[in-house]
Structures are given as C-alpha cells and as structure tokens.
Amino acid sequence: MAKTRDYSTLLEAWSGWRNAVGPPSKQLFSRMIEINNLGVQSAGFHDTSEIWKNELGISNLENIVDDLYATIQPLYVQLHAFVRGRLSAIDKTGVVHSDRPLPAHVLGNMWAQNWEPILPQLLPTAALSGGEDATQVLRRRYSSFNQLVVVAQDFFLSLGFQPLPPTFWSRSQFVRPNDGRKPVCHGSATDFYSQEDVRLLMCGKINEDDFYTLHHEMGHLYYFLTYSHQPFLFRSGASSAFHEAIGDTIIYAAMATKHRHRLGFVSTGNKTNPKDLDIINLLRQALVKIPILPFSLALEKWRWGVMAGQIKPNQYNQAWWNLKLKYQGIVPPIERSEKDFDPASKFHIISNTPYIRYFLSSVLQVQIFQALCEASGQGPRFGKPLNQCDIYGSIEAGNRLREMMSLGSSHPWNVALKVLTHEENPKIDAQPLMDYYQPLHEWLVIENRRLNYTIGFD
Ligand code: X8Z
Ligand code: ZN
C-alpha cells in the first residue's frame, strides 16, 4: 500500500484483505460483543463501552474527545484538502476527484491512518531533492533489523535510560520467524513482571514505518522498566493513553529536522532552503501524526455505538463508513454492503483492543514533547518554536520523563502530567499540537487558496 501508485493494484490489495478477513469474522464479532455485554451487565454496567470509557480516568470522555477534536479539525481539513487537491491533479485515471471525499485506498496505508508514504506525490520532485528517502538510507546502512533496534535504543540512551536488558535481546521476536509458525505480527510490547523480563514482538522489516514503530514499542518497554520498582498493582501506565504516548513522544523528537540530519535522512549537499525544508518536514510529520486523530475517533465511536446497541449487526458496515466519511472525509473505493465487515480489517477491532487511547495519546505526546523541550531549555518559553526543539542527548529531558514514568499508576494521570508540565491543574490539551503545526497550517491555507482546492467534505 505504501509503495505502489497503481490504483488498480491498490484496489486489489485493499479489497482482497477486506474480503479475506471481513465476512468470516462478522458473526463471531457480534457474538463477542453480546458476551462482553452480558459479563459487564452482571456487574451493573449498561454495556462494555461504559467500562472502556472509564478506563481512561476522564469523566465525560466523549465530550472531552469531541472538544479536543474540534480544536484540531481545522488543521485536518486543510491537510485533507491539500492531499486531495494534489492527488486529483496528478491522477489520470479519474479515481480521485477534486471535490469529493478521498477514496480509502490511495493514501499509502491499508487503513488510511498514516499518509506519510504519499509525501513524494504531494510535492514536486524539486522540493524533495534535498531530502533522502529514509527507507533507502536505512537499507543502505543496516543489513539486519537488530541494528535498527540498536538505533532506536540509542535515542533512549541519549536521554539517560539504561540499555535494554540481555533477556530483551534474547527473548524478543524482531522479525517474522521462518520455521512455519504464523504469529500475530502486529507490533506489541510485553511486561513479564519478572526481574527485567520485557519483550518486543514484531515482524519487522527495514523501512521507515517499522523504524518508528520500534520507537513506539520501546516507549512501552522503558515504561515497564521505569516503574518496575512499584508494587504489582501500580505497574501500569498513568493511563493507557500515557502508555501509548511515551514512544511517540520520542518519535516526535526523532523526526525533528536536526535528528533526521543525524540519522542521515537529509543529504548533506542539499540545496533546499531551510525554511522550505522545515515545511516539508512538518508536512511529513503531519501525514504520520494527524490522520490518526479522525481515524481513531471514527473507529472508537463506531465501537461504542456497537457496544451500546445503537449500531446493530445489520448496520455495522454502513455505520462504519458513515463515521469514516464524517470524520476522515474518506469513502470506500468500491460499493460495500452488509455482507462486508470492513471494521475487521483493523487489528484492534478483531483483537478487541480499545482504541481511543491512541487519540488521546496523539494529543498528549505533543504536550509531553513540549514539557521535555522546556526541561532541556528550549521551546516557546525560550523564544524558539516547539517544532525546532532537539532533545536528543538531554539528560534534563530524560530525568523529567523518568520522574513521571516511575510513578506507574500509583497516582492519577493528572498528577503524572503535573510532574511533566509543572502546571497546577494540567488538562489534556490540543494547543501544543496546534502550536507545533502552526507554520504548516498557515502554509496549507495559503497553498489551498492559491491552488483553488476545495475545502471540506460535507
Ligand atoms: O497498535 C499500535 C502499536 C502497538 S500498541 C503498534 N499502534 C496503533 C496502530 O497501529 O493502529 C501504534 C499507533 C496506532
Ligand atoms: Zn502501543
């Protein structure tokens, strides 16, 4: 999905995957929902969504996420408009229309949740000439996935974390085993609650996406290790959203222009003017970090509706696409019916893993990044934009992060956030995210206007 630009091949992959996993799992899924609900109803809850919402420790969760998204939506809408405008301008097949919602198969990812792979299609080659293709650089430099693990670990070491323990290296699965086993390959990190036994499971390949996923998983692993002195009951995150946010905070740091230079992702002889390079890099980050916001919101609103009985099995697929259109502005590339069960194409639906944590994490990680940036003596308070912050090698940033992580779940999440931000009554706040992307947001508004691109997808 990331590499090919041939829309018919993309359509084949997109529908092939959904045909394979959807229909066989629909009844099992609806039965699972029933059984889950019977269990929680016997404990006095209305339905499973009530427990899933409580898990985050945020009262009025649905209103809070709606409010957060209302702040971010103008940025998403501009990004969407730019992507659609560019894709339709270069599309000779009539698949992408300049004023209709985006078809779900052309965005560089099986689920349209990360659009980074289509960056080269969005910018004229001249603008990209200074940048290197990170996947190519990684393949040139490293011959095994283990070496990528070492590079990801290096960022954590630079912040003063200890090297991962020997059992991590011997007991993890980094790449797909070639002995006939068929493991679940979706990346995960596991705490075995025994000495320092923490492990990673991936079917990793040497590419940019997996490189960043490694940082994500390592965030979980270092969180496990940092709170391992806590009593068993407190050996978890301040909330699941915090657990998801640690590694992604490091991804923000690793995607910063300065660090991309360190990693060799920007060629030294490049002639692009630094201001343009900054916008290109912000666009790259936005393509990774912004689409997941409406994606996660639509996904979890669908599931809350299903659990609460507002979305019935015979409405599953239509309700799914209604939410995708409303929040993401995307449509299925071919006709769908209730014989299809497209939600099943996503790991977290079929594995029954809550997802709103990733929405909250996407907001929180920029708050954490800002706190670490300030701890290292940079950022807005020191008169420098947040997106220019380079925390690699900052022990102060590392100490601030470890201070929060070592609490585990011994305190409510707002205490953990206070440890980070030093604010009296910290809230989950989308402002740091909007500040981070502010120059890109402005640029998108100007470009969309200049190119007369349609905005929005009502
Ligand atoms: O599932 C994950 C991690 C494991 S917790 C690989 N993520 C979400 C996804 O893949 O959909 C990380 C980003 C969002
Ligand atoms: Zn995770």
Image (cartoon, rainbow, N blue to C red):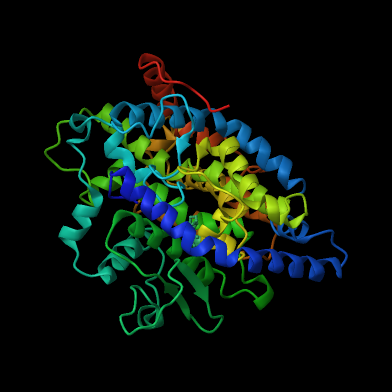
Question: Which residue: 43% across, 65% down?
Answer: 218
Question: Which residue: 71% across, 59% down?
Answer: 52
Figure check: 413 above or below 409: above
Question: Which residue: 45% across, 64% down?
Answer: 217
Figure check: 189 above or below 268: below
Looking at this view, is 178 or 14 the one in front?
14
Judged left or right of residue 50, residue 253 is left
Label total for image:
0
Figure check: 216 above or below 129: below
Residue 48 figure quarter: bottom right
User: Looking at the picture, how far across and down is residue 433, in whole percent?
Assistant: 51, 37
User: Looking at the picture, how far across and down is residue 264, in whole percent?
Assistant: 20, 50
Judged left or right of residue 387, residue 420 is right
Question: Which residue: 63% across, 55% down?
Answer: 416
Figure check: 443 above or below 362: above
Residue 458 figure quarter: top right
Residue 457 figure quarter: top right
User: Looking at the picture, how far across and down is residue 357, in whole percent?
Assistant: 60, 54
Looking at this view, is 298 or 280 the one in front?
298
Q: Is residue 367 visible?
A: no
User: Looking at the picture, how far across and down is residue 119, in whole percent?
Assistant: 31, 39
